[in-house]
Image (cartoon, grey):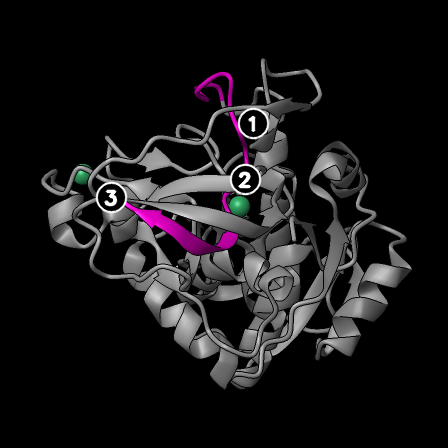
Amino acid sequence: MRAMVLDSPGSALRLAEVPLPGLGADDILLKVHACGVCRTDLHILDGELSAPRLPLIPGHEIVGTVAAKGEQVERFSIGQRLGVPWLGHTCGHCRYCISGRENLCDAARFTGYTLNGGYAEYAAADQRYCFTMPDGYTDAQAAPLLCAGLIGYRALSAAGEAERIGIYGFGAAAHIIAQVACWQGRRVFAFTKPGDLAGQRFARELGAAWAGDSTTAPPEEIDAAILFAPVGALIPEALRHIAKGGTVVCAGIHMSDVPGFPYSILWGERTVRSIANLTRRDGEEFLKIAPRAGIRTEVEPFRLDEANEALARLRDGRIRGAAVLVMK
Ligand SMILES: [Zn+2]
Ligand SMILES: [Zn+2]
């Protein structure tokens, strides 16, 4: 099969002919139809996430159909459409796993990072971590639901009952989560890179009550903020704008260092927290909500062999919505 392969961090992906993945008893072989391109992939390529398997096939927003099954696979049938997310394996018995927090499992393995992912014509995945995908989405439209949507949803949940939600960084996750927040009756305040007028217009089209530069203050206090941009300096920036009792949720897996800030902007029972990975329950919940909330995803399609181009455009902020590799 053809795959885009990372040989070592800091290098471009290489188009290669590689053997089909072998299947364990619980594994499914998927014919990959589409795979989303996520900012986490950039952190892996850049060596900011330091423990990838190598060589690695990246990609953790995989939509495909079952082409073959291991002998214990009963949940799914040949030809069925499935989604494969970032969480690819957990131990099932550590303190985190048995308390509903498998996203924190110390022995977890991750698709497209410590397991091979979906920048390929075929991918293997453990059936226990796959999702059935909602109808009404093409393969390409469904792919961003699997990380941008899912982890964005976990971040939105961590913001609690906040009515006025600030979103920093208006990329793939934000464009989905803004729609969920509006559907839940919240008001969205979108913060983009300074001068990104196209991004601000996009946010307003998706229902944002206000959109502006990340360096400016919103027109009123906000109740919580979600940071999708991997910029640590935005934490004190967001803290200055949230009301007492509000939370700043950091949704990315990597961030630049957080500068020092005065305690007074944290005072008033404000909270700063991160979101790590996902649980299968997050996935089941969000994939039910997405069609009910009428979530539309906007995608820019690329061919498999254009993965480097897609990643470069994501890095430069030149993607509207989500970049997706489309294999068929
Ligand atoms: Zn991701
Ligand atoms: Zn565990």
Residues drawn in magenta: 50-69
Circle nearer the N terminus (2, 3): 2
> Disc 1 marks which amino acid?
Ile
In this orientation, does residue 160 appear? Answer: no
Relative image position of residue 15 (x, y in whole percent): 68, 25
Nearer the viewer's eye, disc 2 or disc 1?
2
At label 3, which amino acid type do we have? Gly
**Residue closest to the eye, 189 or 40:** 40
Residue placed under numbered mark 2 in the picture: 59
Residue at mark 3: 70
Residue 183 tag number? none
Label 3 to label 1, Cα distance in Å? 29 Å
Left or right of residue 300: residue 181: left
Determine which quarter of the picture holds residue 216: bottom right
Q: Which of 23 and 181 is in front in this view?
A: 23
Assign the magenta stretch its main secondary structure. Answer: loop
Is 201 situated left or right of 162 in this image? right
Q: Residues within 10 Å of mark 2 (few under 14, many from 20)?
A: many
Q: Is mark 2 within 8 Å of ligand 1?
A: no
Q: Where is residue 41 in the image (x, y as percent from the top left)?
A: 59, 35
Asked if disc 2 and disc 1 are in contact, CB closer than 8 Å, the reply is no
Q: Residue at x 58, y 15 (%)?
A: 7
